[in-house]
Image: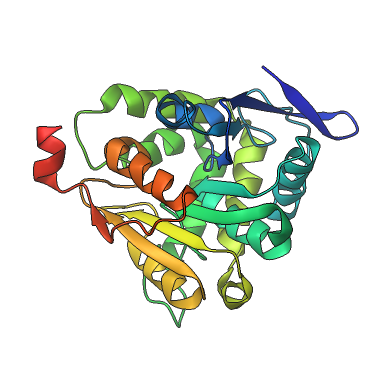
C-alpha cells in the first residue's frame, strides 16, 4: 500500500486508482479508506480516486498522542500537496465530512468542491440547535469509548445502517474500527465532540454538496439542513433508503450524485426511494 510521510517518522497510507479529475475520500471515526471500495469500483474508470487511512487508522502509522482536527487537517494537506493535487473534489463521511468543512475553510485554494455525507457542522445538541445527541448523553458516549471501546464500536456501527440486508458489510466496518487503538479512538472522538464549525460556514466559498440519509441515527440529518442554511454555496440531497452510510445503502444513486457534482451538475434534492432500491 502506498504511503507518504506527513511529518518526520509518520507515514499516511493511501490508495490512488484511476485517472481524471481527482476525488479524495476521507472516512469517518474508527474507519478506514476501505469504506470507499464501491466508490472506487464504480468511479475509478472515469476519475482519479484517492482513499486515505487517517493517522491512527487502517494501515497508517499510529504514534502516541492526541488526535485532533488540527492534526488531521495538517495530514490531509500534506497528502494533497505531496500528491500535487489541484481542483480536488474532497469527499468526507461523518467525522471525515466534519473535518472536510475545516479543511475547506483553511485550504480552499486546493479544492474545486467539497462533498459531505452523513455529517454536519456539529455533532450534538446546543441551546440554539435542539437536535443531535443530547448533551446529557455526550459524556456517556465518551466514557463508553474509554471503558468499552470494542463494544461501543460494534454498537455504533449497528446503528449506521437503515437497510437490514447488509450485515456482512456492517461486520466489515466493525472490524476496521477494532483496528484503531483505544487512545486514538478516544481523543479523536473527543475532537469530534469539541469542534463546532457553524461560525465558519458562512466564510466557506467553495461549493459544498451535502448528502444525507433520510434515516440517519448517528448524525442527525437536521444538522445537514443547518449546514445548507449557513453555507453560501451549497446543495442538499436526501437519500431515502439510507441511514448513516448512504454511499453503501443507496450506492447507485449516491455515486451518480457524486459524479453530477464533480461535473458541475446540481444533484436532485431526493434520490433512491424504497421502490427504486427494491427494483435495482
Where is residue 87 shown, x and y percent of the image? 65, 50
Left or right side of 23 for 210: left
Where is residue 46 shown, x and y percent of the image? 48, 31
Query: 210 and 30: which one is in front?
Result: 210
**Can residue 217 be seen at all in this image of the molecule?**
yes
Query: 208 and 72: which one is in front?
Result: 208
Looking at the image, the residue that sits furthest to the bottom is 128
Residue 276 falls in which quadrant of the image? top left
Where is residue 24 shown, x and y percent of the image? 59, 40
Quadrant where the N terminus is found in the figure: top right
Query: 178 and 105: which one is in front?
Result: 105
Residue 11 falls in which quadrant of the image? top right
Q: Residue at x 53, y 39 (%)?
A: 27
Quadrant where the C terminus is found in the figure: top left
224 in relation to 174, above or below: below
Q: How many marks overall?
A: 0
Q: Residue at x 11, y 35 (%)?
A: 278
**Can residue 67 be seen at all in this image of the molecule?**
no
193 in relation to 183, above or below: below
Left or right side of 23 for 46: left
Residue 194 falls in which quadrant of the image? bottom right
Looking at the image, the residue that sits furthest to the right is 8
Left or right side of 246 for 5: right
Where is residue 244 shown, x and y percent of the image? 35, 47
157 in relation to 72, above or below: above
The figure's colour scheme reads rainbow
Q: Residue at x 63, y 75 (%)?
A: 203
Amino acid at each position: 500500500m502506498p504511503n507518504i510521510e506527513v511529518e518526520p517518522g509518520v507515514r499516511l497510507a493511501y490508495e490512488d486508482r484511476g485517472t481524471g479529475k481527482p476525488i479524495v475520500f476521507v472516512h469517518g471515526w474508527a474507519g478506514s479508506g476501505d469504506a470507499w471500495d464501491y466508490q472506487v469500483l464504480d468511479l475509478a474508470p472515469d476519475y482519479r480516486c484517492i482513499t486515505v487511512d487517517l493517522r491512527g487508522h487502517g494501515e497508517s502509522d499510529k504514534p502516541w498522542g492526541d488526535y485532533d482536527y488540527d492534526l488531521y487537517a495538517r495530514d490531509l494537506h500534506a497528502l494533497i500537496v505531496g500528491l500535487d493535487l489541484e481542483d480536488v473534489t474532497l469527499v468526507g463521511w461523518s467525522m471525515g465530512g466534519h473535518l472536510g468543512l475545516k479543511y475547506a475553510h483553511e485550504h480552499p485554494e486546493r479544492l474545486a468542491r467539497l462533498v459531505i455525507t452523513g455529517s454536519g457542522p456539529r455533532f450534538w445538541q446546543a441551546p440554539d440547535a435542539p437536535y443531535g445527541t443530547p448533551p446529557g448523553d455526550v459524556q456517556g458516549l465518551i466514557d463508553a469509548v474509554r471503558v468499552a471501546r470494542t463494544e461501543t464500536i460494534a454498537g455504533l456501527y449497528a446503528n449506521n445502517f437503515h437497510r437490514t440486508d447488509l450485515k456482512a458489510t456492517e461486520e466489515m466496518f466493525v472490524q476496521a474500527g477494532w483496528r484503531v487503538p483505544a487512545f486514538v479512538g478516544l481523543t479523536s472522538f473527543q475532537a469530534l465532540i469539541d469542534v463546532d464549525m457553524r461560525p465558519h460556514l458562512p466564510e466557506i466559498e467553495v461549493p459544498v454538496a451535502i448528502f444525507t440519509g433520510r434515516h440517519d441515527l448517528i448524525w442527525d440529518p437536521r444538522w445537514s439542513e443547518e449546514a445548507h442554511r449557513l453555507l453560501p454555496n451549497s446543495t442538499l440531497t436526501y437519500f431515502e433508503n439510507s441511514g448513516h452510510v448512504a454511499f453503501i445503502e443507496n450506492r447507485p444513486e449516491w455515486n451518480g450524485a457524486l459524479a453530477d457534482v464533480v461535473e458541475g451538475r446540481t444533484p436532485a434534492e431526493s434520490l433512491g426511494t424504497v421502490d427504486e432500491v427494491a427494483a435495482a
